[in-house]
Amino acid sequence: VQLAESGGGLVEAGGSLSLSCAASGKISSIASMSWYRQAPGREFVATLTSTGITKYAESVKGRFTISGDFAARTMTLIMNNLKPEDTARYYCGMHLRTRAFTPGDNHWGQGTQVTVSS
């Protein structure tokens, strides 16, 4: 299983970016999709479950939106009103099963850099 992020880059404060993530490989089902960031510590950003429940870190609530297509194995993070403190490497993760009736594991992408200039 591989996860690949795209869409990072450099943006001015107040600007917007959209990050995407796609999973490939042998996947039976996906239970949840998440975004984390690291700079330098690791921080939860947002998660979306297969039942449609979303959760956001307080620091991004109202500015970031997570969405996903569980059948297509893709997810997106739309980031608006970006701030310099949002600068980090962003990682997508999915809790998925490679075989039915197994607990599943967390899988992560390599990350994509987001830099917000002041």
Image (cartoon, rainbow, N blue to C red):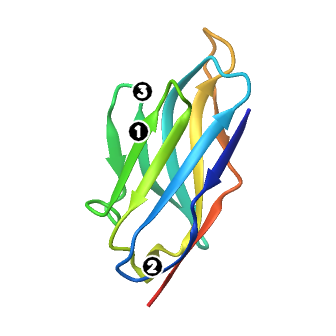
Q: If you read the primary sequence from the N terminus, does the residue marked by circle 2 or circle 3 appear first? A: 3
The answer to whether marks 2 and 1 mark residues whose Cβ atoms lie closer than 8 Å is no
Q: Position of residue 116 (x, y in %)?
A: 49, 80
Q: Locate residue 77, reporting x and y percent.
A: 44, 53
The picture places residue 66, in percent across and down from the top left corner, at 39, 48
Displayed quadrant of residue 10: bottom right
The image quadrant where one finds the N terminus is: top right
Q: Amino acid at mark 1?
A: Leu
Please give the name of the residue rendered at 64% of the width and 36% of the height, measured from the top-left corner. Answer: 23
The answer for how far apart the CA atoms under marks 2 and 1 are is 23 Å
Look at the picture and state if 60 lies above or below 34: below
Q: Which mark is residue 85?
A: 2
Few, some or many residues within 10 Å of mark 3 (<14, 14–19, 20+): some
Amino acid beneath label 2 = Glu
The residue singled out by tag 3 in the image is: 50
The answer to which image quadrant residue 24 occupies is top right
Residue 106 as seen in the image, left or right of residue 65: right
> CA gap, disc 2 to disc 3?
30 Å
Q: CA distance from mark 3 to mark 1?
A: 7 Å
Instruction: Point out the residue furthest to the top here.
Output: 101
Above or below, 41 against 30 in this view is: below
In this figure, which residue is indicated by the disc labeled 1? 48
Q: Are marks 3 and 1 in contact (CB under 8 Å)?
A: no
> In the figure, 33 relative to 6: above or below?
above
